[in-house]
Image (cartoon, rainbow, N blue to C red):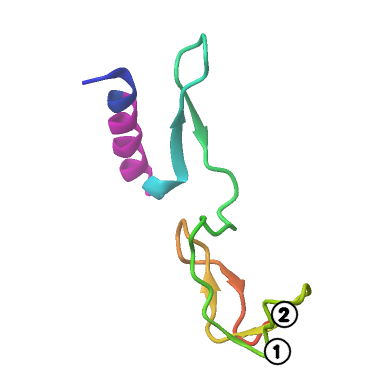
Amino acid sequence: MSDLASIREELIREARASEEPVAAVEVRSVPDSRPRIEPNGSPFRLVAGTLIPAVLTSGINSDLPGQTTALVRRNVYDSITGRYLLIPQGTR
């Protein structure tokens, strides 16, 4: 097993033992040093690719530059634990 894989397995065991979400930890390899363990940061975030259920409240004309607005249909919670409300329903 590679060093990174063994570190990852150790992190998962520790996270399960401490009831910390497994996704809250990542392993980064830094050039010219041993891999180090860093927390994922704030639990108040959405990962790239998260869908935000919304309905457009303004039209879109792809020939013209500008902004559009939408109304969020459902509450959106953080991607790490799913406990924290980040975007309330009805947000524009």
**Looking at the image, which residue sits at the far front?**
63
As for residue 50 lying within the magenta part, the answer is no
Which residue does the image show at 60% across and 49% down from the upper left?
Answer: 42
Identity of the amino acid at label 1?
Ser
Q: Residue at coordinates 45% horizontally, 19% vertically from top-left?
A: 35
Q: Which residue is mark 1?
A: 58
Residue, x 52% and y 69% (percent of image)? 77
Residue 61 coordinates in the image, percent (x, y): 69, 82
Q: Which residue is mark 2?
A: 68
User: Residue 53, relative to residue 77: is it above or below?
Assistant: below
Do tag 2 and tag 1 residues touch (Cβ < 8 Å)? yes
Name the spot of residue 16 as percent of width and height, x first: 31, 44
SS at mark 2 in the image: loop
Camera sees residue 74: yes
Q: Residue at x 51, y 9 (%)?
A: 32
* Other residues around mark 1 within 10 Å, as few (<14) / some (14–19) / many (≥20): few
Q: Residue furthest left?
A: 1
Residue 20 is at least partly visible in this image: no
Residue 25 rendering spot, x and y as whole percentages: 45, 40
The numbered mark, 2 or 1, whose residue comes first in the sequence reads 1
Asked whether 90 or 19 is in front, the reply is 90
Q: CA distance from mark 2 to mark 1?
A: 6 Å
Query: In the drawing, does residue 86 fall left or right of residue 9?
Result: right
- Binning the other alpha carbons within 10 Å of mark 2 as few (below 14), some (14 to 19) or many (20 upward) gives few
> What secondary structure is the magenta-colored segment mainly?
helix
Q: Nearer the viewer, residue 52 or 4?
A: 52
Segment tinted magenta in the rendering: 7-19
x then y, percent, for residue 67: 76, 75
Residue 3 has which mark?
A: none
